[in-house]
Image: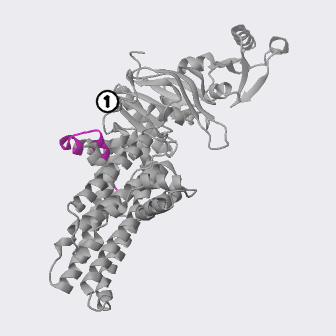
Amino acid sequence: MRILAVASNTFKETIRNRILVNILLFAVFLILLSLVVGEWSMGHQVKVIKDFGLSAMSLFGLLIAVFIGIRLMVQEMEQRTIYLILSKPIRRWEFVLGKYLGLAATLAVNVALMAAALWAVGLIQEGRVDLSLIPAILLIYLEILLIVAFALLFSTITSPTLAAVFTLCVYVIGHTTAFIREFITVHPDKGAHWLLRIIYLVMPNLENLNLKAAAVEHAALPPHAAAFGGLYGLGYIAFVLTLTVLIFENKDLK
Amino acid sequence: MTDSVIFTEDLTKIYQGELGQKPTVGVEGLHLDVRPGEVFAFLGPNGAGKTSTLKLLTRLLMPTRGRALIFGEPVSDNRTMRRVGFVPEQPNLYGYLTAAEMLDFIAKIFGLPASVRKKRISDTLDRVGLAASGGLAVRTFSRGMMQRLGMAQALINDPDLLILDEPMSALDPIGRKDFRDLILDLKNRGKTLFFSSHILSDAELVADRCGILNRGRLVQTGILGDLLESQTGSIEIAFIPAGGRPSAEDLARFSFSEQGGNRVVRVTRPEDVTAVVAAVQAHGGRLVSVSPQRKSLEDVFMAEIGR
C-alpha cells in the first residue's frame, strides 16, 4: 500500500508536469508531421512514417526520461518534501520503488499516446493498424524505463546537471557498445583498452532493445529476440534500481 | 530507559566535509531521556545541532555513533515510527495536491483504511484551523497555513509522540497562540511532545522540561520550573515613603529606583529584606510588595551558552 501511495502521488505529480505535456505534444505533432515527410519519400511512405514515428517515440521518451527522471528525486530533496515522507513508517526502498513506478505509469501513458498517434497516421496512410509494431514499441518503453532508472541513480549521487550528462552518456554509449566491442577486438593492445572493456561490460547494450528497423522492414527477427530484449531490459532495470536503493538507504538527508 | 519515550545515548553526528573541508560536528555525545506525557523544549542558538538531532530521531540522518530509541525501540524500526508525528522546520508540502489529498497521501503511508481516512482528515483539518481549506491547492497556502497543514500531517496517525522542528517560527501571534493551545491540548490527552525552538517565550509557556544545546553539546537539561527557580536572582521590595524617607544610615548601602510612583530596592540576601522592611515601617512608609525576581528562560539560556 505504501509503494502504491507513493506511486500514485508521483503519477499525479508527473502527469501534470508542463515540461512533459509540452514534450508529448511536440512528439505527437512530429509523428503526425511524418505524413508530410512520407509524401517526399518516393514510394516508401509507410516505412518512412513508421521509422520516423518510432524514432520520435524513442527520442522524446529519452527527453522525458532525462528531464522528469532527474527532477523526480532532486525536487523532493530541494523542496524538502522528502523529510515529511521518509520520517513516516516507510522504507527507503519502498519510496524509491514507488517514485519509479509512478513515473513508469506516466511514461506508459505517454508512450501509449505516441503509439496511438503513430497508428492513427498509419490508418490514414495504409487503411489499417499495424499491430506488428507492438514488440518494438514495448521495447522502446523498456528502454525509456531503463534510462529513467539510470537518471534516478545519478540524481541520488550527484548534481542534476551532472546526472543529466551521465544519463545521456549511458544512452549514447548504450547504442554504441557494438562499436566498442569491435574496437576492442580489432585493437586489443591500444592504451585505453582496459577502460573500454570496463565500459563495455558495465554499460547496457541498448541495441538489445532496438527492434525498430526490423519492425519497419517486417524483417524476420531471430526467434525470441523480443523476449530476450524484454528480459535483458527488466534485468538491467532491477540491477540499477537495486544499486540506487543501496546508495539511497544510507544517504543523509541534510 | 524502559519507560522513556525518547532515549539517546552518546548520539553523535559528524558531517564529513566536502573535498578539502574539515568535518563539522552536528551533535556530539547527546544523552537525552524524554518521559511519557512531557512537553520537552529543545533549545539552542542557530547551528547548535537541534535540527540534526531531530533528523537523527526521524531517520533522515544516520548517526556517526551512539543510538537513539523511541518507545524503547531503535528509530530504524518501522513500527516505532507508526506512533510518531514529525513536523520539519517550515514544512514544504506537495503544491499540486489539495490539503485533503495531501493528508490522504500521508494517511495511506500510515496504512489507515479508507473507512477511517475520510473522517480523520476532516477532523484533523478542523483541529488545525483549516476546515474550510481542505479543497484548496497547497500551492495557494500562506506560510502560516502551510505550518498548520504541516502540523495536520503529523497528527493524522494520532501519534503518541510529536517531534516538531521550530513549530512556531512561521506563525503570527494568533497562530502562535493557537499552536500553544494545541500543544497543551495534546499534552492533556497524554501525548509526549518534543520540540525545538528559538522562541524562548513560547517554550517557557508550554514546556515542562527543556534541554539547552550549544555547539552540538547538551549544556543544560532539567524541569523548567527548577531551572528558573535555581536562577532566582534578587528580591524586589516596593514601598511608598510617607512622612519622611528611611534614614540614610538604615539604607545607605542599598540603591533605589522609582517605578510608577513607588520606590523600589533590590536585595539578594533574606536578612536584607528584613532590614529594608523594618526601616520602611519605622519611618511610616507603606509596603507595596516583596517579590522574588525569577529569571526568564532567556536569562538561563544566555547564561548557559555563555553570552
Residue A25: name its quadrant. bottom left
Residue nearest the observer in this picture, B241 or B117:
B117
Residue nearest the observer in this picture, A92 or A46:
A46
Residue nearest the observer in this picture, B63 or A203:
A203
Position of residue A253 measured from the top left corner of the image (x, y, whole percent)? 49, 42
Span of residues in magenta:
B97-118
Position of residue A152 measured from the top left corner of the image (x, y, whole percent)? 41, 53
| Left or right of residue B277, residue B75 in this image | left
Position of residue A136 measured from the top left corner of the image (x, y, whole percent)? 25, 67
| Left or right of residue A192, residue B73 in this image | left
| Left or right of residue A194, residue B274 in this image | right
Residue A239 forms part of the magenta stretch: no
Q: Residue at x 54, y 56 (%)?
A: A189
Please state, as top left, top right, bottom left or bottom right, where the N terminus of chain B lies in the image.
top left
Residue B195 visible in the displayed image? yes
Q: Chain of mark 1?
A: B
Residue B151: name its quadrant. top left
